[in-house]
Image (cartoon, rainbow, N blue to C red):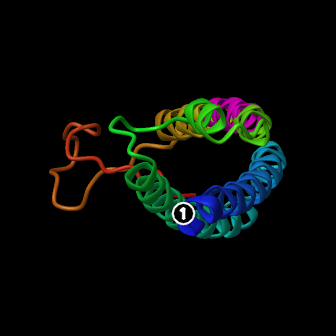
Amino acid sequence: MDQMNGAPEKIKDVLERQIEEYKDLLVLLRKERQCLIDFDGSGVKDLAKQKDTAVLKLRLLEQERLRLMGDFQNLSGEKDRMSLQDLSKTTGDGAFLEIRNRMISLLQGIQELNEFNRILIERSLNFFNGSLDFLGKAAPQKQVAGHAAGGNWAQGMMVSRHI
């Protein structure tokens, strides 16, 4: 019975650590948004590495949470996978509902920022592709070596998109 009494606290500890990691991820996404607005490519690159690390930590915490939840379910005799609402009812601990609400709020914020950043990236790509297309069409045409004098200038022509 001691194991069953301690399991909810261990689950809460993991959930609190997840919340902290989600907060850190939200901060990284805000920084990424600013880097995207400022066209700071190296900043975006650095933040991508940090986001990868944060996501890895979150995956490990999620695996730990699932393991602890499975252990608790086995000890409590529950057959179906438990939600935080179920855990709150089973343990009589309302803290799980408060944690659930905080997690929902954080995840919604992360989803919104991810979507905003995705739109910024798409717009930037469209802008750069449009600029490259313009530069490609506006580049002077050169005759490729080997073409006969007076030949077709456009045929066999190569235009670099690199500036």
Residue flagged by tag 1: what amino acid is it?
Answer: Met
Q: Residues within 10 Å of mark 1 (few under 14, many from 20)?
A: few
Residue 3: image location, x then y, percent: 55, 67
Left/right placement of residue 23 relative to residue 142 reads: right
Is residue 113 located in the magenta-colored stretch of the structure?
yes
- Compared with residue 87, is residue 74 higher up or lower down, i.e. above or below? below
- Compared with residue 107, is residue 63 higher up or lower down, i.e. above or below? below
Residue named by callout 1: 1
Left/right placement of residue 72 relative to residue 78 reads: right
Disc 1 is placed on an element classified as loop
What is the quadrant of residue 117 in the picture? top right
What is the quadrant of residue 14 in the picture? bottom right
Q: In which quadrant is the N terminus drawn?
A: bottom right
Identify which residue is drawn at 81% across, 42% down: 37
Residue 41: image location, x then y, percent: 70, 60
Identify which residue is drawn at 79% across, 52% down: 23
Towards the viewer: 116 or 9 = 9
Identify which residue is drawn at 78% across, 58% down: 20
Towards the viewer: 25 or 64 = 64
What is the quadrant of residue 33 in the picture? top right
Towards the viewer: 150 or 108 = 108
Is residue 70 located in the magenta-colored stretch of the structure?
no
Residue 32: image location, x then y, percent: 75, 51
Residue range corresponding to the magenta coloring: 104-119
